[in-house]
Amino acid sequence: MGCHVEKVRVGHADLARHAMGATTKHPMAAGWLAGSLEITVTYPLEYVKTQLQLQQRASAMYAGADRYAGTLDCIARTVRERGFAGLYRGGGSWILFAGPRSAVRFGAFDALSSASRRYGLEPSAAVDTTCGFFAGIVEAALCQTPNQCIAIKMTHDAAPRGPRRYTSLLHACRTILAEDGFLGGFYAGLGPAVLKGAVTNCLRFLGYGAITRTMVEQRGGDRSASLPASHTLLAGGLAGAFSAVVSQPIDTVKANMMGLEAKEFTSSFACARQIVAAGGLRALFFGVGPRAFRVFIEVGLQFTLFDRIGRLLERF
């Protein structure tokens, strides 16, 4: 990293790409470390979100009066019944996949962005959106689908009317494989998972790029200077929260397609119809509060940590 200051004309997505650290020489390693640190902090909110998403009136496991009344009720009852560790039920899968997930996300985005420049495409919001979209597809297919199939089944297993069969992450994986097979067990809900990954990554990279571009402009357009951590945290958090709210219906369908009752749904569309028929459109937004809050923290931390870790790794 040079110590000189380069003044440039501001207004293109290259500023955002520089601010978010996509120019780091080690995107995979930076993404791996950033993802592992982030999920350790935010998983309890993911657990609560999933519990709320799964308590659908269309479900045979619907708990009625015993269902969770909301985010705080879910947290309080979980801690009371199983201790604080109960909020990390299924979290082993997320922690196991967190590094590869972020490494694939940032690595794919960086590779696609570099390829676009080699083919003469000027940096722009459209290029960022397209690269983010396809990076999301790669991430969902390689990491997020098997990760969430395991975590969601373990979370569903711990629901108020859940069977509570799984004794550990390894036991859950063995049981899922034995009962549902590899594809049926670890790739259920692949369609909505890929769609959600593509939509959220598209919105996150586009939103983060637009916000950081504005921040750089307000600071005088000095693209060689790193934005303060508080700025990248806020930019990533806002982009993430927006993507969470927009994609929540897809995420709710995905969660139910991956849960213990996945075999009850013939397709993602059938799942969505049953959820809406039993609980109305609002049922597709169950858990949106903790998800938006978690993703605000998640994306803000990931972009900030990715940027800082990437710069640190470049010294070696």
Image (spheres, rainbow, N blue to C red):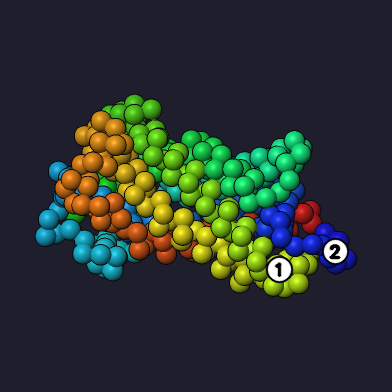
Which amino acid type corresponds to the residue marked 1 in the rendered image? Answer: Glu
Q: How many numbered marks, from 0 up?
A: 2
Query: Among all residues in the image, which is located at the extreme left?
Result: 65
Looking at this view, is 145 or 195 the one in front? Answer: 195
| Quarter location, residue 262 | top left
Q: Position of residue 273 (x, y in %)?
A: 23, 41
Where residue 6 is drawn, which disc sits there? 2
Query: Among all residues in the image, which is located at the extreme right?
Result: 4
Q: Is residue 78 left or right of residue 278?
A: right
Q: Is residue 278 left or right of residue 257?
A: left
Q: Is residue 295 above or below residue 95?
A: below
Which amino acid type corresponds to the residue marked 2 in the rendered image? Answer: Glu
Q: Is residue 182 above or below residue 270?
A: above
Q: Residue at x 52, y 60 (%)?
A: 239
Q: Nearer the viewer, mark 2 or mark 1?
A: 1
Q: Is residue 127 above or below residue 263?
A: below
Looking at this view, is 175 or 7 the one in front? Answer: 7
Where residue 91 is drawn, which disc sits there? none
Q: Is label 2 in a helix, a strand or a loop?
A: loop
Q: Is residue 249 left or right of residue 194?
A: left
Q: Is label 1 in a helix, a strand or a loop?
A: helix
Q: Position of residue 79 (x, y in %)?
A: 29, 65
- Residue 215 seen anywhere in this rendered image of the structure: yes
Q: Which residue is mark 1?
A: 217
Mark 2 residue crowding within 10 angstroms, few (<14) / some (14–19) / many (20+): few
Q: Are marks 2 and 1 in contact (CB under 8 Å)?
A: no
Q: Residue at x 54, y 37 (%)?
A: 138
Looking at this view, is 190 or 41 the one in front? Answer: 190
- Residue 90 seen anywhere in this rendered image of the structure: no
Q: Residue at x 54, y 48 (%)?
A: 202
